[in-house]
Image (cartoon, grey):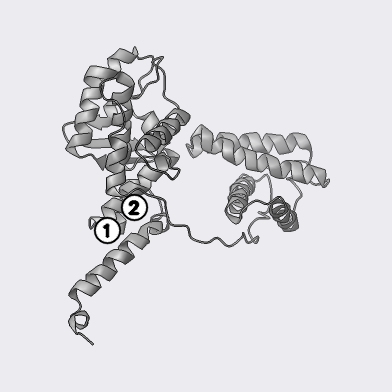
Amino acid sequence: MSPASPDTRSTHAWKDAYVEHLLVIKGLADPSVAAYVQDIEMFIQFLEQKGESVATCDANAFLYFLLHLKSRGLTNRTIARHLSSLRGFFQFLQTSNRRVDDPTAHVDGPKLTRQLPEFLDVQEMQGLLAQPDTGTKLGFRDRTILELLYAAGLRVSEVIRLQALDIDSQTGVVRVWGKGAKERLVPLHPAALDYVRTYVQAWRPQFAPQHKVLFLNRSGRCLSRQAVWKNVKRYAVAAGIRRSISPHTIRHSFATHLLEGGADLRTVQLLLGHADISATEIYTHVQAGRLRAAHQDHHPRTRIKP
């Protein structure tokens, strides 16, 4: 296939083809695809204002775009996200023969400082879990969601897609469909399993289910990501947790508490569903603290008084 002509129609056709690639081939969730599209459309608009196009732009166009984002006061992390979205788009254009080159290949992104993940300590986590009123169907549903988020380190997008058949009560394992439709199996502790069993048998039927998903809203339809986020924030306030948290904070807490309990980084990587262990290395601050404590407790020189 020869490169298409650099007009607006081809540009939008290429974007549409990339969206289909993300949804069908890579299996990304709609919210992730929408975020990529938003970044790409911003770049397309920037090019059009400069009289350029996706078909003909070069590396300089990206440098000017990054400077433009910086001038708008965006953080380095947000700018890096924009560049990552565009890298994926232009790599697709090259591999699909819509462009002969990838102009992002030699563009360096902004340097990022490593941020430690926000997590709850064990006492805070226990306080959060205790907030839903388990005497009501909504409260019991929310307690079950919190238990699963913490027991399996699930992403919010993963928990709202769960179906009852994804929970194996006999083996105590939940089957999770993560990013890119990748499957992983995560063991659940007995307390979480008990909540799931009771919810499925006693409470879920009261929602008059309209869908196969495990967790439903008042109308018996799929529970949204936004609803879970709002509930987590509401229960955090009720638990006296003053800083802002999200469902992902619970995922960070899951990983952190495993490492504090002695789990190794590779195990945590598998449980979280990270394709690359570098994504799991944000939790090495926990291992570093444990190693220091072990060193102080067991190295013979630490017992020698000066």
Foreground pick, 10 / 145: 145
Q: Identify the residue shown where x is 27% and y is 34%.
A: 130
Foreground residue, 189 or 260? 260
Quadrant in which the N terminus appears: top right
Disc 1 target residue: 264
Instruction: Determine which quarter of the picture holds residue 173.
Output: top left
The extreme right residue here reads: 51
Q: Which residue lies furthest to the bottom in this view?
A: 306
Q: In this view, does 204 lie to the left or right of 9?
A: left
- The image shows residue 294 at horizontal and vertical percentages of 22, 69
What residue appears at the point 34 percent right and 38 percent down from the top-left corner? 239
Residue 86 percent location from the top left of the image = 63, 48
Q: Position of residue 204 (x, y in %)?
A: 29, 18
Residue corresponding to mark 2: 269
Q: Where is residue 90 in the image (x, y as percent from the top left)?
A: 64, 48
The residue lying at 58 percent from left, 50 percent from top is 81
Determine the secondary structure under disc 1.
loop
Is residue 2 or residue 121 the one in the foreground?
121
Say which amino acid is labelled 1: Asp
> In the rendered view, would you say 233 is above or below 82?
above
- What is the secondary structure assignment of the residue under circle 2? helix
In this orientation, does residue 2 appear? no
Q: Residues within 10 Å of mark 2 (few under 14, many from 20)?
A: some
Camera-nearest residue between 79 and 176: 79
- Side of 48 relative to 256 (left or right): right
Q: How crowded is mark 1: few (under 14 residues within 10 Å), some or many (20 or more)?
A: few
